[in-house]
Image: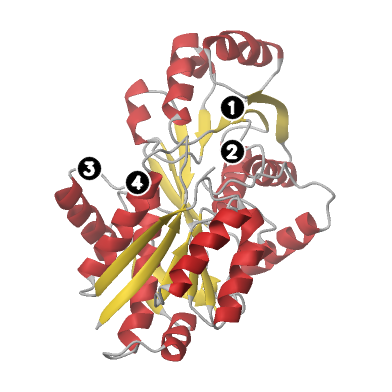
Amino acid sequence: MSITIGILIPRSDIFPTLPQHVVKGIKLAFENEGIDAQVIVCDIGKGVVQDLVMSKANELIMQDVDITIAYAGKKVLDALKALFRTSKKPLMLMGMGPNITREEELGEAPYIASNSFDLWHTCYLLGEYAAKNIGKQGIASVGLFEGGYQLLPAFNESMVQNGGGVVATHISKQLDEIDFTGDLNNMINSTPADYLVEFFSGIDSPRFYDLCVKSGISKELPIITPSIGIEPFAEYNKRLVHGLSWQPFVKNAANEQMITSFTQKHNEEPSAYVALAYETALWIAEGIKACDGKFNTATYCEAIAKASFQSPRGGFTVNSEKNTNQPFPTIIVDGETVASYSIAAEQEKELVESFSSRVQAGWFNPFPCA
């Protein structure tokens, strides 16, 4: 059976390889699952301009693609979902899941499903870990278009619930020497704190660590982060606490197959974006295989809603109410210590309801990649 897959993918200044990694991850999963998939890739710019995103989505529908995968900004998702719901075409959303109140990003049976890294879970759990294992007071360093929007509120909420909190926040519009040798260093020297938590990603992450090491900041405080691509910074030999729902060293057959096949095929190691895209395609493959030789939208949608399989993050199951993935545990790495932590379903519900009722639960970030 031949399947046509449309991909709506954004460009990212802070993660320039994002489009290639997502497309490579999707194609590799289909290849490993033995699915003959024709892939049509559509560039949607930064993924936040509704006219552009909707134009590209309509092009895919006009080409009669079987399934569309979209990684788009939060502000365009309502319109995108409405289009596919009306057209009765399957749409698979995917994203990092940074916002506690991300209702508009969730799936919607039968046509729309969503796979997420639930990054806000990770940030909340890192806050709990910090309060219980490192100290009660932290200083946050965030990019203007990064974690200050959504990740820091989740982290701080957990700190407060565990008797601590972020006592000072350094916001960096552009990472430079003055930022670190001046503003951030002054903040650290004048504010009693037990750790530094950073929310940068993509090309800003190595810049952050380079500046930390050069300025001597990382010598004074442990650093906590959920940033993607953190592995290169182990060479600095500082205490680094890193959390994410996927780690490359996880020992399961699906993760090992993805890493081995990706590395052999592309001569580079997979990123978290590869893992997310690969897992999303595995989920789609469950629906395709249920069609038994001839693609049928109804059969596909029914199979997607009750899928269960092994992914790079472990056992993948579906939240039938939201048509999205059940969250995976966060794997927190603190030196030689590696542990998994989760948010209970009832606790998650309480947090979502609490943040939904607040006037401002963090700055609004429309961009999909941050």
Viewer-side residue, 34 vs 148: 34
> As drawn, is 89 to the left or to the right of 278?
right
Q: Is residue 106 visible?
A: no
Q: Amino acid at mark 1?
A: Tyr
Viewer-side residue, 301 vs 237: 301
Circle nearer the N terminus (4, 1): 1
Give the foreground label among 4 and 1.
4
Q: Give the residue pinned by disc 4.
A: 271
Q: CA distance from mark 3 to mark 2?
A: 32 Å
Q: Give the residue pinned by disc 2.
A: 130
Discs 2, 1 touching: Cβ within 8 Å: yes
Q: Is residue 253 visible?
A: yes
Q: Residues within 10 Å of mark 2 (few under 14, many from 20)?
A: many
Task: Give the percent coordinates (x, y) of residue 149.
Answer: 67, 41
Q: CA distance from mark 2 to mark 1?
A: 8 Å
Give the foreground label among 1 and 3.
3
Q: CA distance from mark 2 to mark 4?
A: 25 Å
Circle nearer the N terminus (3, 2): 2
Q: Give the residue pinned by disc 3.
A: 268
Q: Is residue 76 above or below residue 359?
A: below
Task: Give the percent coordinates (x, y) of residue 209.
Answer: 45, 23
Task: Give the percent coordinates (x, y) of residue 89.
Answer: 50, 79
Give the foreground label among 2 and 4.
4
Q: Amino acid at mark 4?
A: Ser
Q: Residues within 10 Å of mark 3 (few under 14, many from 20)?
A: few
Q: Give the residue pinned by disc 1.
A: 195
Circle nearer the N terminus (2, 4): 2
Task: Give the percent coordinates (x, y) of residue 60.
Answer: 44, 68
Q: Amino acid at mark 2?
A: Ala
Q: Is residue 302 above or below residue 206?
A: below
Q: Residues within 10 Å of mark 4 (few under 14, many from 20)?
A: some
Q: CA distance from mark 3 to mark 4?
A: 9 Å
